[in-house]
Image (tube, rainbow, N blue to C red):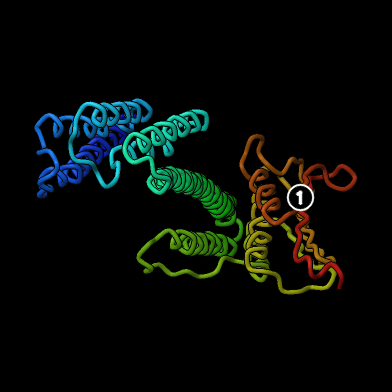
Amino acid sequence: MVIRAFGERVRNADARRQDLGLALLVQVAVTMPFVVPRSPDLPPVTWASYAMTTAAVLPLIWRRRAPVGVLVAILVLGGVYKVTLDGPGQPLPYAGLIAFYTVALRCTPRVRVAAGLASAVVVALSVGWETGTARELLFTLFVSAAAYALGRLQHTRQAYTAAVEARAAELERANRIEAEQAAARERARIAREMHDILSHAVSIMIVQAEAGPVAVRAAPERAEAAFEAIAETGRDAMAQLRAMLGVLRTDGAAPRSPQPGIAALAELVDRVRAGGLRVSYERTGTVRELPAALEATVHRVVQEALTNVVRHAGAAAADVTLAYGPGTLTVTVTDDGRGPGGAPGGHGLIGIRERAAAHGGTAESGPGPGGVGYSVRVSLVTSPLEVGN
């Protein structure tokens, strides 16, 4: 509000300076007949006539604040000048034309009509007082109409400029809102990615670490494999985090490797198997290559579902199925645990639903077949072009 008020004061100050400069310019124009040599048969100029001429120019300083009052003052002073003083005439009624232009620019239609009729009457009386010729009457009416037309054109131009500025401001606001929404979506995406990567890696490492001491006593060779699985899971998580966070750098120095896709699911399943969970992985239907973003979503959905199984289900086995259909892909992860395969209030299943919705799909979760275990089922739209194939 303070900035807006300051800008308004600056604009008003500029307008006052403009009006003052315009009044000075008109004063120079009306002074010329007083300083050029006059014919000997004409009476000499007087200070009184010059003062009256100046008085008819001064109201222009307030033309924006009171356009009708300024027009009336100029017309009255001009009439008094013609009736009472025998001073030099002017080629054009400069002050009156500018006042009439301002009325056309700033006043309402009713006021403009009234001012136009009154001005026409004054013009007719003035011409009749001086020469009474039709030529001068037509010329004076023409220049008055031209001043009115210029005022209306300027009003149209200002209205158009204001509309363009308002539209630009609206677009700027819309772009700012869109940018904020895009930033919020990106933050949510990064949060989902970090949750999936870290949750999966930490869950696998915890399972392996808990099994390590038992394996050391019973089967040392299995303990070595468990520790190697922990290290491999940590290295993979670090690699994925570097790849994801690299896109946040602005200097272009970070590597930008693609996110894991469907091809990496076999490796993901192997890591989970190494933790002791029996996992089967199957693909049905016509297997085909999918967009990278969709494949990354499939990988994250399976990763999060298996992480939930490891952390919460207490399951001994899990099945991962990718069913390719016409224009669709259905991902199902089912376990034989106690369910549900997700912590109450956790972000895992929420993230799965958000990922599915981002590709026009749906996500369902609930008891497994026959009420045994828990099942997560995600249906994704692959490509509208494939529906007709």
Q: Secondary structure at mark 1?
A: strand
Residue placed most toward the observer, 374 or 71: 71
Residue 88 in the image: state x and y as whole percent.
Answer: 18, 40
Residue at the (9%, 32%) spot, across then down: 47
Q: Where 231 sits versus 65, above or below? A: below
Q: Where 372 sits versus 380, above or below? A: above
Tell me which corner region of the image, top left, top right, bottom left or bottom right, holds residue 60.
Answer: top left
Tell me which corner region of the image, top left, top right, bottom left or bottom right, holds residue 218.
Answer: bottom right
Q: Residues within 10 Å of mark 1 (few under 14, many from 20)?
A: some
Residue 335 in the image: state x and y as whole percent.
Answer: 77, 50
Residue at the (74%, 40%) spot, across then down: 340
Residue 79 in the image: state x and y as whole percent.
Answer: 29, 29
Residue 163 shows in the view: yes
Residue 165 shows in the view: no
Q: Which residue is mark 1?
A: 362
Residue at the (35%, 27%) spot, across then down: 72
Residue 34 in the image: state x and y as whole percent.
Answer: 13, 43
Please give left or right for residue 12 compared with residue 178 in the image: left
Please give left or right for residue 322 compared with residue 81 in the image: right
Q: Tag 1: residue type?
A: Thr
Q: Residue furthest front?
A: 41
Residue at the (10%, 46%) spot, across then down: 40
Q: Where 138 sits versus 324, above or below? A: above
Please give left or right for residue 344 compared with residue 99 in the image: right
